[in-house]
Image (spheres, helix red, strand yellow):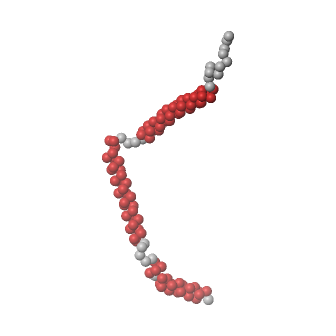
Amino acid sequence: MGKSESNTAEPRRGRSRRRAVAWFLARWSMVGAIWTGFIALLFLAWCAYDLPGPERLNELKRQRTQFESQVRSVLDAHQKLLETFKGPSFADRDYARVEDNVAYLSQKKANIGE
């Protein structure tokens, strides 16, 4: 007689399809994780390439102190400049004198015009 027509011999399609999808996702997730790790290592190597060696630490400290002293001198010069102009201005000190000069010059101009 050939095949029996029982339902037990036929595999379930739903479970094997889910398993195939899960296996596909797991496999490509692993491939993606490996490539991500590789790219992260390349980025780390690229960042570390330009870092100075430990033998240059004293030189870097000296450069930093030179920079700080230059910035400090610029700030001191600006502070002196601000203190110079902090006092009363020309208009505050000599306002009356300027008024007299304007009155005198306007009189002189009026006399010349006549």
Please provide percent x and percent y for residue 91: 48, 79
| Residue 92 versus residue 10 in the image, above or below | below
Q: Residue at x 57, y 28 (%)?
A: 19
Q: How many numbered marks have been drawn onto this rendered protein structure?
A: 0
Q: Residue at x 33, y 50 (%)?
A: 62
With 15 as the anchor, is 67 left or right in this view? left
Please provide percent x and percent y for residue 8: 62, 21
Q: Quadrant of residue 16?
A: top right
**Going by the picture, which residue comes out furthest to the top?**
1
Please provide percent x and percent y for residue 18: 59, 30
Along the viewing direction, whichever of 18 and 114 lies nearer the viewer: 18
| Residue 88 versus residue 66 in the image, above or below | below
With 7 as the anchor, is 101 left or right in this view? left
Along the viewing direction, whichever of 75 and 112 lies nearer the viewer: 75
Q: Residue at x 37, y 61 (%)?
A: 73
Please provide percent x and percent y for residue 79: 39, 66
| Residue 20 versus residue 89 in the image, above or below | above
Is residue 28 something one can see in this rendering? no
Along the viewing direction, whichever of 30 and 109 lies nearer the viewer: 30
Q: Quadrant of residue 41?
A: top left
| Residue 110 versus residue 74 in the image, above or below | below
Q: Quadrant of residue 89?
A: bottom left
Along the viewing direction, whichever of 75 and 104 lies nearer the viewer: 75
